[in-house]
Amino acid sequence: MNKKINKHGIISLILFFAAITLGIIAMLSESILCTIIYLVFLLIGFFSVIFSYCTKCAGRFHCGHIVIGEIAQRFPRRKQTEYTKWDYIGVIIPLLIILLFPQLFLFKIKWMFIVFWILIIVAVFEIKLFVCTKCKNSQCFSCKMNYTNTH
């Protein structure tokens, strides 16, 4: 387990999943079937992102997101090399679906739509400004600048 906890890693996950929860609530008000399908895809997508990206990260043993690093360590080891187009596809497609599918339902409830995107934007800023700056992943496009400046 990590000795020093990066509170921003935890905050960013809470913000992200709070936004996702809003999307789920909006979906539930209209379609239980769509909600169930989304929940299944959310789980599959979450593990796809971890497998595609986090298992190659050198920082997975001291991950700023804590929980994600712990999950990534339970997947088969992958050598830390440059990310391939398949690695990016395994991240981008699930994230797009996870973020965009709820919009069909959120758009009908304006305050939820606005809060959803505020939470996502703040989570991204938390990650970029506070998590990536401490990350050891020399292959990540976001963390690479920090790595090259300190090593």
Image (cartoon, rainbow, N blue to C red):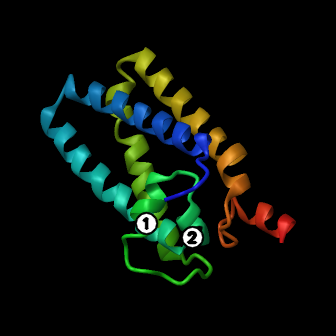
Report helix, strand or loop for mark 2.
Answer: loop
Place residue 130 in its image quadrant. top right
Classify 3 as above or below 74.
Answer: above
Looking at the image, which residue is at 43% across and 42% down?
99
Count of labels shown? Answer: 2
The type of residue carrying mark 1 is Ala
Tell me: 66 left or right of 71: right
Tell me: 8 left or right of 16: right
Looking at the image, which residue is at 55% across and 27% down?
118
> Measured from the top left, where is residue 113 in percent x and y?
44, 24
Query: Outermost residue, left direction?
Result: 33
Report helix, strand or loop for mark 1.
Answer: helix
Reading the chain from its start, which is encountered first: label 2 or label 1? Answer: 2
The type of residue carrying mark 2 is Cys
Q: Is residue 49 visible?
A: no
Tell me the distance, in whole angstroms, between the alpha carbons under discs 2 and 1.
Answer: 9 Å
> Measured from the top left, where is residue 83 in percent x and y?
58, 75
**Which numbered tag is attached to residue 57?**
2
Q: Quadrant of the C terminus?
A: bottom right
Q: How many residues crowd mark 2 within 10 Å: few (<14), some (14–19), many (20+)?
A: many
> Measured from the top left, where is residue 42 in percent x and y?
31, 49
Looking at the image, which residue is at 58% across and 53% down?
64
Q: How many residues crowd mark 1 within 10 Å: few (<14), some (14–19), many (20+)?
A: many
Query: Outermost residue, right direction?
Result: 149
> Measured from the top left, where is residue 104 in percent x and y?
34, 32
Looking at the image, which residue is at 36% across and 17% down?
109
Proximity of marks 2 and 1: CB atoms separated by less than 8 Å: yes
What residue sits right under mark 1 in the picture?
A: 72
Question: Closer to the camera, 112 or 54?
Answer: 54
